[in-house]
Each structure stands twice: as C-alpha cells, then as structure tokens.
Image (spheres, rainbow, N blue to C red):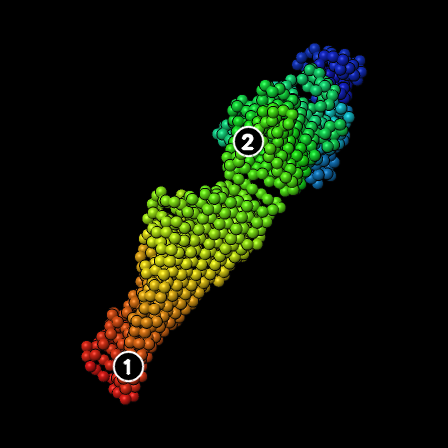
Amino acid sequence: MNKIYKLKYDRRRNQLVAVSELTTGAGKEATGSVAGQCGLQGVSTFRRLMGALTPLAVLTGLVIGMLPGLALANPDLPVGGQVVAGQGSISTSGNQMTIHQGTHGLVTNWNSFDIGQNHTVQFVQPDSSAVALNRVTGGHESQILGTLTANGRVMLVNPAGVMFGKGAKVNTAGLLASTKNISTEDFMAGRYTFSGGSHPGAEIVNQGSLTTTKGGYIVLAADRVRNTGTIRTPSGKTVLAAADRVTLQLDNTGLASVSVSGSVVNALVENSGLIAATNGQVYLTARGKDMLLNTVVNNSGTVEARGLNQQGGEIVLDGGDSGVVSQSGMLLADSETGRGGKITLQGANIHLAGGSRTSATGRTGGGEVYVGGGWQGKDVAIRNASKVVMDRDAVADVSATEKGDGGKAVLWSEDYTNFHGTILAKGGAQSGNGGQVETSSHNNLQAFGDVDASALNGQGGNWLLDPTDVTVVGTGTDTGVNSATVDNSNIFTPTASGAKILNTTISDSLDKGSNVTVKTSGTDTSGQKGNITISAGIHKTKGGDATLTFLADGNILTSDGQWNATELINATTGKLNLAMLAGNGGTITLGKYFKASLNGGDFTAGVNNSSGEANPGAVTVIHSNAGYINAGNITIDALNGYGGYAPTLTAAGNLTINGGISVNTGWNVTSAFTAGDTLKLNAPAGNISFSATDTSHSGGRVVLSGDKGVSLSTSNGGITLQAADASTNSVNISSANGSVNINGNGGTVSFVNANVTAHDDLNISADSGHTVGINFDNSVLTAMNMDITGVSTPGKATSEHDDYGGIAIYRNVSFAVGNKGIIHGVNNKSYAQGSRVVGIRFGRLWDKATTVTFNGNFDVTGEVQSGAGGSGGGLSYSGPVKINTINGSLSLSAIGSGHFAGSTGVASPYTSGNAYTFVLDNADMNLKVSAAAAAAIDELAPSGYATGYVFSGNGNVTISAHNNSTSAAALGSNVFDNTALHGRFSIDATNDSWTAILFSGKTRFSVVNATIHGHSGGDGGGVVIDASSGDSIQVNLGNNTINGDSVSGTGIEIKGKNVSITNGTLSGTATSGNGVGVKLSGGSNYTLDGANITGHAVNGSGVIITGSLTVNNGTSVAGQATGSGSGIRVSGNLSTGEGGGITLNGTASAGDGVVVAGNTMLMNATLQGLTDSGAGVNIAGNLTADNATQIQGNATGKGAGVILGASLTGATVSGVSGQGVGLQLADKAVVTNASLKGESTDGSGVAVT
C-alpha cells in the first residue's frame, strides 16, 4: 500500500468514508432515490458504485475502511494556487494558509481546494465587497472540514463538487460554492453568470456551519444541492439553486438579485438542516428536466427568514415547471416586531406534508403565504401549479399576533387542489381584522380542512373557495380519490372530477368569525357550467358576525327539504350575512321548504357581477314551496323574475325585490313580506302580482308590511293584489305613465319617509279638523305639475303652545316639478292666547335642522285667515331651516289677514341661532309678505337671541313686505346676510303706521350690493338699524343703495357700534313735521368709508351725526331742511382715517345750514353751510379741530355766515353774509390756534356780541 487515500461522501450512509485515491464518484443517482432507503433503488446505487471501481480500489477501500485514524488522501490545505487575474499572494504557515488580495477582483486556479480538520484558510481582502474567485481544476471534489474565513466575498468553483463537512466553519461577507463554470473575463468584468461544466453526479453538500456577516449572502449552485448543516445569512440572502445557469447581481451592499434558468436532469435542492436569514431572504430553486412527479425541491428541515426588528423576510421554494416541491419541515418568516414576511411555494406539483409548518405571522400584521399561485391564480409573478395537496396536520399561518390585520394565504392549482390541513389568518389579539384565505382550483377542489380568519377585536377575514361545479356535502370523502391517497405516492392523481366542500368546514370557519366565499368559474371547463349545489346544512352556532357568499358562474340550487325539517342555513350566535349570486341568465332555486334564519344578518340574491360590469345581466329566483327567510335586510335582484308558492320573507330592516313578481298561495297559507323598515317591490319590466285566491282550494293570505313604508311600482306593467289582507303603512307611490291624486278630508294627510312620483300631475289636498292639514316629513315629491293645498281648521286649542298649520314641513323634504308647482297652506280658525298660528310651518323645535328643496317653478303661499288670540304667521319656521331653490323661480308669499294679536306674515320661534337660510342654484326668489296689525317679516325671539335670514348661491332675490301696525315693523330681524349671494338683491318694505324696516337686538346685518327701500306712513322710521345692544353686534353695509322715507319720523337711522358703511348711498327723507332725513349715531368701531349720505327734512334736520365715528376715503354728507330745521347737525367725535376726510354740506332755509353742538371733535373735515336767514355754520358747542379742517358758512340774507358761540380750537373759519354779519363771535367765545375770517356785503364782516 502506498498509504495515499482520500475521503468520499457516501450518499447511502450519509457520511464520509476513506477510499483509494484511484476511486471515482458514483455518478448520477437514480431519480427519486432517498438517502437511507433500503430497497431496490439503494441496491442499484450500490451496484453502480461497484461497477465504477477497480478490484484494487474495492479491496483498498475495504481495508482502509477498517483502519481508523489513517491519513486523508485529500490535502489539508489548497494545493497549486496560481493567480491568473488581479493581484494577490498566497502564504502558508503551519496549519493556516493566508491569501492576500490586492485588487477588488482576484482569480486563482487551484489543483485542489481542501481544508482539513483543524486547518484554516483566510482571505485578507481590500474590503467587504472584494471578490475572490477560486477555480479548482484538479478533477477532485473539494472537502472543507476546517475553517474558511474572509472579510470579503469568496467564490469556490469545482466541477467535481464541494462538500462542507460536519466540522466545517465558514465565515465570510459572501460565499458562492458551485459546480458551474465562469470565465475569468466575465468574472473580472463583474458578469457573474455560472453555467455548465459540472461533472456527472457532482453536488454541493453542506454538513457544517456556513455564516456571513450582516447583509451577506450564501449561494450553493449545482445540479444537486443538499444542506444538512447550518446556513446563516443575517439580513442577507441564502440561495440553493439546482439549474443549468445561475446569474448573480452584486453591488456594494451584497447580493442584489439572482436569476436561475435552464433545466438539468435529476435536479434537486434539499434541506434537512437549518437555514436562517434573519431579516433576509431564502431561495430554494430547482429547474428539473422531465421530472414528472419526482421531487425537485424538498424541505424537511427548518428555513427561517424571521424579522427580529422589522417585517419578516422572504422564503421562496421554486420547483420550476416539472417535478414536486415538498414541504415537510418548517418555513418561518415570522416577525416579533413588525408584519409577517412572505413565503412562496411554486412549481408544477406542491405537497405540504402532515406536521409541516409554513408561517409568516407578525406582531403588527400577518404576512403572505402563496402555494401554487397568487390570489385566484392571477398573480403573474407566481407560477400557477398544476396540483396542490395539503395534508392533515399541515399548518399555514399568516396571523397577526398582537395587533393589525391577518395576512393572506393562498392554495391554488390549475387542475387539482386537495385541502385537508389548517390555515390561520387571524387578526391581532389586541386589534385588527382577520386576513384573506383562498383554497381553490380551476378544476377539481376537495376542501375538507380548517380555516380560521377570525379577529378577537375586529372584523373576521375572508375564505375564498374557487372551483368549477361544486357541491356542499355532509360527509368527508374526497371525490374519486382513495382514502389512502393523502399519504402515498399517488397523492397528485385524483381519479374523478367534481369538487366538494365539507359543510362543517364552512360552519367552523363561520363560527370563528371568518367570512367564506364559494366561487365557481365554469365558462372554460368542459362539461361544467360553474354551478353550486348546497345539499348539506350550514349552521353558525358561535362567534361574531360573518358573511357566507355563493358566487356562481352558472346556477345555484338548494336541495329540497321537508316541511318539518330544520333550517338548511342558520345562525344562532352572531349575524350571518348570506349572499347567493348566479351568473347572467342563471337561476337561483331555493328548494322546497328552504329555510334560513340569519340572526339579523342580511340576505342577498341576484346576479354575479364580480367582474364589475355596468350591465351584468339578470337572473331568475324561484322560491319553490312554503319556505322562509328571516334576515336583517333582504335584497333580491331578479330582473328575469321572482316567483314562488307561499314564500315568507321577514326582514328586520329593509326588504327589496327588483323584478317582475308572481307569488301564489292557498290552502289557508299566509305568504308574508314583512319589513321592519321599508318594503320596496319594483318591476322595471313585467307585472307585480300577489294572488291568494286559489279557486281549487280554500285560498290563502298575502301580507305586505313595512313599518316605515311600502312601495309598489312598475315601469311597464300592472300591479295586482288579490288577497284577504293586504296592508301598508307609510306609503311610497310611483306612477310611470299617469297622475297621482291624494285627497284627505277630516284628518291629516301625512308623508313620512315617503317618495311620491307622478309622470303627469300630482294633486294633494286636505281639509283637516286637526292641527295640521298636510304633513311632509323627510320625503320627496316629483311631478310634471304639482298642486298641494292644506287647510287646518281645528275646533279648539289644547295647549297654549300648540302649533297649527295648513302645511307642516319637517327635516329633509324635496319638491320637484317639470313645469309648475303650487303649494298653499291655510289656517282659518281661532286659537288660544299663546298658540302659534301658521299657514305653512317649516321645521320643529326638537329637530336639529330642516332642509326644503324646490326644484323648478313654485308658488308657495302661507295664509292665516281669521281668528282671535295667538301668534304666528303665514310662513313660519322653527329650528334652523334651509330652503334650496334650484333651476327656476320660487315665489314665497305670506298673508296674515284678520285680527290676530301679533299675527305676522313670516315668523321664527324662540330658538337662539336659528335662521332661514335661502340657497339659490340658478334660480330666482321672490318673498312677498303682507300682514294686518302685526309684522310682515319678523322673528319673534326675545332679547338675547340671534335669528334671522341668510341668502347665498346664484340668483336674484326680491323681498317685499307690507303691514299696518303701530308697534311692529313690516320687516324685522336680528340677522340679515346676503354676502354669499351672487345676484341682485332688493328689499321693499312699507308700514302704513310705523317703522317699515327694523333690524335690532342681537344684530348681525351684512348686506352688500343691494337696493333697500323702507317707507313709514306714520312717525316710525323708513329704515332703522339699531346696533346699540350686546357685544356680538355687527353691521356691514357695502356698496348698497338705501332709501328710507317717513312722514314724520326718521327716513334712515343707523346707530350703535361695530358698524361699517362702505361706498354706496344712503338717502333719507322726512316729508313733514320735525322728522329727520338721516340720523347716524356712532359708537365704538363705527366707520364711514367712501359713502354718500343725503338727508331731507322740513322742520327737523336733514342729517344728524352724533357720537363717535371714523371717516375714511372722502365720505360726503349733504343735508337739507326746507322749513325751520337745520341741514346738518353734528355733535360728537368725527375722526379721519385713511384716504381723506369728510365733507358736510348743509343747506337750510330759515334754520342753520350746519350746526355743531355739544363737545365735538373734527379731523380733516370740511363744513359748508348755506342758509338764508339762519346761520350758514353755527358752532354752538365746544369744537376741537385740526388745522386741516375747513369751516365755511354763507348766509344769503340777513343771517350770519358763521356764528362762534363757544370755544374753538384749530381749523380755518370763513364766514360770508349778504346783509348780516360774516363772522359773529360771542363775547364768551374762546378761540385757540384758529384762522378766522368774516365778510359781509351790506353788514359787518366780523362782530362780537
């Protein structure tokens, strides 16, 4: 013996053995061989091994195998290293070899590259991204039994194979071990593609410990790759690839991507050890050629891509388009801090064996597990499998462990899915909804496993089952599959078609709060139409609310039952929503005695529109015989018709059927359609027929009931009700081709939650002996023409605070006409003192708000005719009321006739903050009000309440008010605002006895671009704005034309604080007596900005200005008195702001042109007074002015130009007289820092008296 030996890996023993150096490998293994089997395949392997050895080699091997401790044939360190590219050096010291790399890339050819036990090879590289390629050319397998370290990346290419033994320890920034070739040129150019060159039977095997630094990678690439040891790539990537070609994309951070292509014979990637890529990715990929049902990827060990401080990583088992991907171990992409990661198993055939766990759970949300395809097989990034089998006791888990939603788990196949395992997609324990689960096949689905997509503190998730034709069955036998097939080699070969779902698996999933969807797709599967048959009961007995959906391409059928049988589908705990949706043209047949009670859940039947088409088509629904459905809401869309014999539908909420209806009953059987809310039966085409008059038997009974309304409507057909008892409550009425006429006498006609539509005319009239004639509450009325008249004539008031009205309108009410609408409310009876009498009332005090919409042209009149006592008006509102006017014109007329104490045209209640809000949308509004001895437009709020009228939108508004009252204005309000209105705005008010327009109290008066006219026929004011009380008062007048006139009162009076008058004109007239044309009484924040003010009087003053005012931008004031009055009378503080001062031009006949009384301050003012016999300017009080103030007085007759009777500080004074004194100073007058000048034609220029 020459004492030269080597170690070879014995695949049968799964260990190294000592053999002669002349021994070669065993060649390729037989397809499907399994290590450790003792059978024919094992014998064949042994025979091939024996055939490959010479007799001497066999003898030598046997002898050496019996002599422990002999020296190894493979060297302890690499041999024959030659640097062929890049720069580097190789040194050996004792049991360690050191390779110093001087360039980023280094290529070294070796005769052999082995590391013996207790030996070390160290690569010293420029940085962690440097790459060293080590190419072995000696033809022998590399055996790594010692230690390999590198601060950078190492590639070991040996066509004969690489084996990392049990004692091997590798630690690098990146490692590739491959039997595939790469050229020196490609390597140095950074083109890392490895292909071809492998010796027959060459493998990459790891029994040791392979580790990288953080972010590193390990790639093992050969025709066959096995791992029984440990591989760790924290925050990096692990790739085990069996294929002809492998390409790596490297960057400075590590392995950016890897691609695998090209199939090889007997490809295999196998892991029975541990692969851990914390926060990283693991890829087990094989491309086998003609593998049929042989395994190409097999995991019986543990693969981890856990997320320790972030979302879980990614694991991919990819078997290509041939062979079997087998998962019998642990695939873990969980995260203790974030969301779960992603696990993908793709290949032609996939097997999740019993005892396996595929887990992507996460603390803040579940991850993703895809087996055989993506959701509904539509994810182009995941190859769809032909067959998928999940054994009993196999678990897939995508739950959220603490909070967040469950993840997504999919089993999908094109041909056959057998599901017996358990899939968990639970929401977090603290919060979160259940996840999404699918177990489907395009063809044959056998679903007998368990799904839990529940959520303790959220909504349950969804379970989708998507085969072709399918039957819900009550037994657990697979269709056409032997009972042993879940455990033997024929697992992927079903012997018959036809999908089955076990009823208890659905029930169990619903009990856990998971939603279940059974969906069929039969359009492209031969012989199958996508029908669903329910032949076994589904019972939800615990858990929260859940939804069960049957979504068919074809028909849906429930098996016939017995009259005394239990319910086929029911729920006793939690709501169960049930949906049955068939394909276009299909039929939903609820078999004889079909019974369902959903514990408050909703029932829906109709057409399958999962594709989201605009016109999905129509179905027929047949309710065969005397069955019932009890649900929360019931919706049946059967545009091809709904019919049955004596069905009973009971909905706690709404019950809606769309489609022609034909229901018959007899034999004393009641067919009841009952809704706790609204019953709506609508036939877009066809008739509606309920018949309980079976002539051959004793007849039956039809009950139609809706607590909040019943609506029967057809678009092109008739309505027939033939029953012993047909009842309705609140009514929705529709007429597609005619008029609707409703007439009530002696009682209130009430529309609550009603919808009334008339193709032609809608006529509603009521003459009620009750408090209200017609009541509209939350209703919609539509017609071509509309005539509504409500009269209230109650006999006696029952309360001092009763409201009486011809028409009452509450909450949201819409009136729409194509041509003309007339609404008239009349109240014509006497009432107790304190009662409110109204023609039309909008809103109630206890309602939050009322919105009334008039679409089209409407005349709306509220009238109070006669009586004694009480208060109110033709139109009245309670609470916030919004009136919308759209596309036309709205005429609101209020008439308060008779002799009511306090009868008004428009009135509001005692509620702070309420307002009439008028919104115009391409419409005009005319508010016309007349009253007798009370206000025409007023709010009845006592002091401290803010109510009134607000206008906005696009359109024109005209308001006219007329009354004859000595104590109430024709138009009065706290709030008046048109600042958001785009259109003309005009107000015209007349009071024959007192004030016409009065805004006072808690005033907010903001009016711009308006024309306002007020006329008082007595001693009241034409227009009075009183802002003198309260802190929240605000008056804003901008660019208005305001005209006020009074016989003996004040034409216009504006007083108080927080007043702004900008631009525009104020023109006031008092036609007799001591009346005043315009009176401005200033307070804090009272501003005149560019306004033109004109006042006319007789014996009173044309204009009176008192208090404190700020004047901006050249305000002009002109006052005239034709009798003994003065043109302008000023007392107070007029200061000038920006843009110029104020000009006061007063004209009088016998009185003074301008009078300055009291203590007055003027800044940048011009006073011009003209008179005949009086004084042009009479400074009767103490006046303080600045040097810019000009005072000019002119008396054309015997009067004085200027009289200075008190003190004067500042100003330039000029007096001119014809026959009197130009400047007359009283002997007590004090003049300081002023310029004085007096001239007279026939009298004295200056005189002191």
Inter-mark Cα distance, 2 to 1: 96 Å
Q: Residues within 10 Å of mark 2 (few under 14, many from 20)?
A: few
Q: Which mark, by number, is residue 1173? A: 1
At x 63%, y 19%, the residue is 474
Q: Is residue 965 visible in the rendered structure shown here?
A: yes
Picture layout, residue 400 above or below residue 61: below
Q: Which residue is mark 2?
A: 725
Q: What amino acid is found at the position of numbered circle 1 in the picture?
A: Ser
Residue in front for this viewpoint, 691 or 67 = 691
Residue in front for this viewpoint, 1148 or 583 = 1148
Q: Is residue 406 visible in the rendered structure shown here?
A: no
Residue in front for this viewpoint, 254 or 36 = 36
Q: Residues within 10 Å of mark 1 (few under 14, many from 20)?
A: many
Q: Quadrant of residue 316?
A: top right
Left or right relative to 780: residue 694:
right
At x 60%, y 34%, the residue is 721
Question: In this rendering, which labeled residue sits more in front, label 2 or label 1?
Answer: 2
Mark 1: which secondary structure? loop
Label whose residue precedes the other's in the sequence (2 or 1) = 2
Residue in front for this viewpoint, 536 or 712 = 712
Residue 1102 image point, x, y percent: 33, 72
At x 52%, y 31%, the residue is 652
Mark 2: which secondary structure? loop
Residue 943 image point, x, y percent: 32, 53
Residue 170 image point, x, y percent: 62, 27
Left or right relative to 1075: residue 448:
right
Residue 530 image point, x, y percent: 70, 29
Picture layout, residue 713 above or below residue 511: below
Q: What amino acid is found at the position of numbered circle 2 in the picture?
A: Asp
Please identify the residue farthest to the bottom as the structure is shown. 1242
Q: Quadrant of the N terminus?
A: top right
